[in-house]
């Protein structure tokens, strides 16, 4: 398959399904995810950044 490390679609589909099974079994609690989002937002506000955009350079 083009630029893929997988020999064919069947192997790719199996690996994707295996990953999804793992991800669903190891999902983080929504409260943990919300706390991580709040912390990232707090750090961005301290840096006066919005969503990873670089700060404008002072003239």
Image: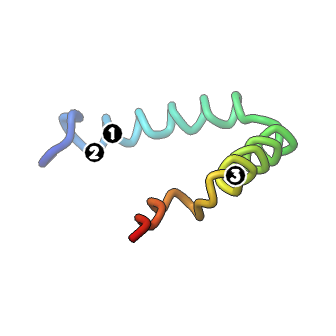
Q: Quadrant of the C terminus?
A: bottom left
Report crowding for label 3: few under 14, some 14 to 19, many 20 or more residues within 10 A (C-alpha). few
Instruction: Name the spot of residue 7 as percent of width and height, x first.
Output: 18, 35
Q: Callout 3: helix, strand or loop?
A: helix
Ranked by sequence position, the earlier of labels 3 and 2 is: 2
Q: Quadrant of the N terminus?
A: top left
Instruction: Name the spot of residue 38 as percent of width and height, x first.
Output: 78, 50
| 32 to the left or right of 19 | right
The residue positioned 15% from the left and 45% from the top of the image is: 3
**36, 48: nearer the viewer:** 48
Q: Are the residues at dot 2 and dot 1 in contact (C-beta closer than 8 Å)?
A: yes
Q: Nearer the viewer, mark 3 or mark 2?
A: 3
Q: Which residue is mark 1?
A: 12
- Location of residue 9 by image quarter: top left
Count of numbered marks = 3
Q: Which residue is mark 2?
A: 9
| 45 to the left or right of 58 | right
Q: Are the residues at dot 3 and dot 2 in contact (C-beta closer than 8 Å)?
A: no
Instruction: Name the spot of residue 50 as percent of width and height, x first.
Output: 59, 64
- Location of residue 23 by image quarter: top right
Q: Which residue is mark 3?
A: 46
Ranked by sequence position, the earlier of labels 1 and 3 is: 1
| 8 to the left or right of 50 | left
The residue positioned 41% from the left and 35% from the top of the image is: 14
20 up-or-down from 44: above or below? above
């Amino acid at each position: 398959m083009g630029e893929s490390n997988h020999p064919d679609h069947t192997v790719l589909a199996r690996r994707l399904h295996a990953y999804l099974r793992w991800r669903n079994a190891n999902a983080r609690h929504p409260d943990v995810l919300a706390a991580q989002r709040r912390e990232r937002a707090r750090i961005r506000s301290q840096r006066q950044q919005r969503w990873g955009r670089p700060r404008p350079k002072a003239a």
